[in-house]
Image (tube, rainbow, N blue to C red):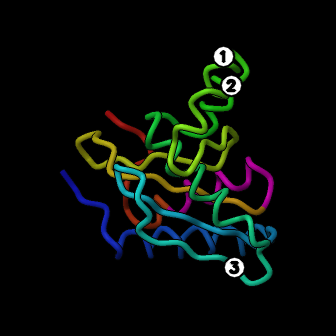
Amino acid sequence: MTVLTLGHANAIIAGALAKAHDLGLKPLTIAVVDPAGCLIALQRSDHSPSLRPAVAQGKASGAVAMGVSSRQLGEMALARPHFIGAVGPLAPHGLVPVAGGVLVFDADGAVIGGVGVSGDSSDNDEICALAGIAAAGLCTEGK
């Protein structure tokens, strides 16, 4: 099983920021967490609002805690709002049930961490998270 290292986290962040720059997006904040949802690295772009780190970490750690992307958490919130409403406060960094939180897998299909991006539209945040993971040479889907 691959371990998500600080080197990986920094490469993910660099890749996500490069994608945001290419797309001309608003300032982003990117959080990378380990399989337990603990923060490995976080970077906040210049002029990124002060709440963005908490949102990015909530997207990443919530995805890891629930084993699905934050986009899927949003779908779950629509189908089972009471469940997501009850579980959210139990998560150490909350759950942010909108796109932008993506699981990171190793080559064997094991979850090795998560990435959360906040700052632009949720769809654009997710695009940048996926681009960052790809730039680090890691997988965004399990086997």
Name the residue nearer the viewer: 135 or 123.
123
- Answer yes or no: do the residues labelled 1 and 2 have beta carbons within 8 Å? yes
Labelled disc at residue 139 = none
Per the model, the C-alpha gap separating discs 2 and 3 is 29 Å
Q: Nearer the viewer, mark 2 or mark 3?
A: 2
Amino acid of disc 2: Ala
Per the picture, the main secondary structure of the magenta-coloured stretch is helix
Q: What residue do we see at 38% from left, 52% from top?
A: 113
The residue carrying mark 3 is 45
The residue carrying mark 2 is 77
Label 1, secondary structure: give it: loop
Label 2, secondary structure: give it: helix
Q: What residue do we see at 36% from left, 57% from top?
A: 34
Per the model, the C-alpha gap separating discs 3 and 1 is 34 Å
Please give the range of residues in magenta.
120-132
Label 1 crowd (10 A; few <14 / some 14-19 / many >=20): few
Q: What residue do we see at 37% from left, 62% from top?
A: 137
Check residue 127 for magenta coloring.
yes
Percent x, y for residue 141? 42, 40
The residue carrying mark 1 is 80
Which of the 4 image quarters holds residue 27? Answer: bottom right
Amino acid of disc 1: Arg
Percent x, y for residue 25? 79, 68
Amino acid of disc 3: Ser
Q: Is residue 68 left or right of residue 125?
A: left
Q: Is residue 129 left or right of residue 38?
A: right
Q: In the figure, 79 relative to 16: above or below?
A: above
In the rendered structure, which disc, 2 or 3, sits on the residue that comes first in sequence?
3
Percent x, y for residue 63? 51, 42
Percent x, y for residue 143? 31, 33
Q: Nearer the viewer, mark 3 or mark 1?
A: 1
